[in-house]
Image (cartoon, rainbow, N blue to C red):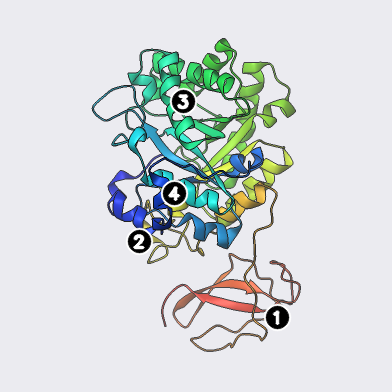
Amino acid sequence: MKRLRALLCGAATAALATAGLGAFAAQQASGASADATALSNRWYAAAPYLMPHDNNPPDAGAIMDATGLKAFQLAFVLAPNGGGCSPTWDGTSPVSSDTAVASVISAIRAKGGDVSVSIGGYGGTKLGQTCSDAASTAAAYQQVITKYQLKAIDFDLEEPEYENATAIAHEIGAAKILQQNNPGLYVSVTTAGTADGTGWFGKQMLNEAKSQGFTPNNFSIMPFDGGFNGSAAQTSALTNFNSILQSTFGWDAATAYAHEGFSGMNGRSDTGEYFRQADFQTVLDYATSHHMDRFTFWSLNRDRQCTPPDNNGQTSGTCSSVAQSDWDFAKYSVQFAGVTPPTTTPPTTPPPGGSCTAPAWTSSAVYTADNTVSYGGHTWKAKWWTQNETPGTTGEWGVWQDLGAC
């Protein structure tokens, strides 16, 4: 996952304070000590990525209230920037002395949710590169699991680590050790996606897993930043990746899908690809119909609208660069987990029409959540519906969200 470090917004301390976590100061000294009811694996499989230190972290509790989301994938644990075999957040904040992320976790658990922690990511120095072997790499990650009482962990194996065969052997070996030493631990392995499924280094990683006899809950690919254009290219890559899993591990298609995951990027990608709400729905339908194990995305920090909505054609680490309401993309993760997201209570009277307040609402039209129209020099988006409250049905009325300013 690219972290868009050039676009970071605010210092870590200020950002964490913004998340409204002061009430959990008593728990900070001993880490994330709040117990949570164990979630089903489906929730850990649906957990979107959240950077708790960077990219203007949103309030996890507010997302939970708005969407019904229960699980978060916190990113990233790395080796120290100065070298060594001890876990840190983003290479700078030692896990051993952390209180800030621990308070985020406690806040989530206090509301009935839980977290997974992602290790690695795009860039930075990974523990598999600095630790001497798989056992020492696993010991470093065990510190993270123990401190935060984790029930799930994600190995995000990509640039530049996955080009280092020794480092990948350490990571896969560590994942196997953690799986053995922590019964029931949900383990995902995430790597780069290509039109063919995954590239040479991704295939070498799968071969390493096979040679070590390691099978995680899923192998997920990231079909973005590789010349993709919308959901059709993504589902094609997932189909191709399924074939790779079959040929590598000797699985049939159904078994391969049961160990396959999708990790997308909402809105505008680092390379200028666009993945809108309709694309997420298409991939979600593909994932559920093929009984895939995981559906997640990068990232919740970006799951809100920019100003202007298209961010002047630029990619941001703090907003999506597409027209949306806050947490639109998180709701697809909630659907994957098997829970219907809450809906906003619709108005009791039809909205006004024919003015700057809203365009005329034509009862014979078919509206969807992504419908936009131009009216009065502004762009408007369908906001909600009444009657049967089902998007895409003729004869509905609702309200319009102004994507500009009158």
Q: x and y percent of residue 114 in the render? A: 55, 45
Q: What residue is pinned by disc 3?
A: 142
In the rendering, at what x and y percent does residue 26 appear? Answer: 41, 50
Marks 2 and 3 sit apart, C-alpha to C-alpha, by: 43 Å
Residues tagged 1 and 3 counted as in contact (Cβ below 8 A): no
Q: CA distance from mark 2 to mark 1?
A: 34 Å
Residue farthest along the top direction in this orientation: 211
**Amino acid tagged 1:** Ser
Query: Which quarter of the rendering shows the C terminus?
Result: bottom left
Estimate how packed mark 3 is, as few (under 14), some (14 to 19) or many (20 or more) residues with alpha carbons within 10 Å: many
Q: Quadrant of residue 9?
A: bottom left
Any mark on residue 104, and which?
Answer: 4
Q: Nearer the viewer, residue 389 or 200?
A: 389
Q: In the rendered structure, which disc, 2 or 1, sits on the residue that comes first in sequence?
A: 2
Which mark is first along the chain, 3 or 2?
A: 3
Dot 1 or dot 3: first in sequence order is 3
Local secondary structure at mark 2: helix
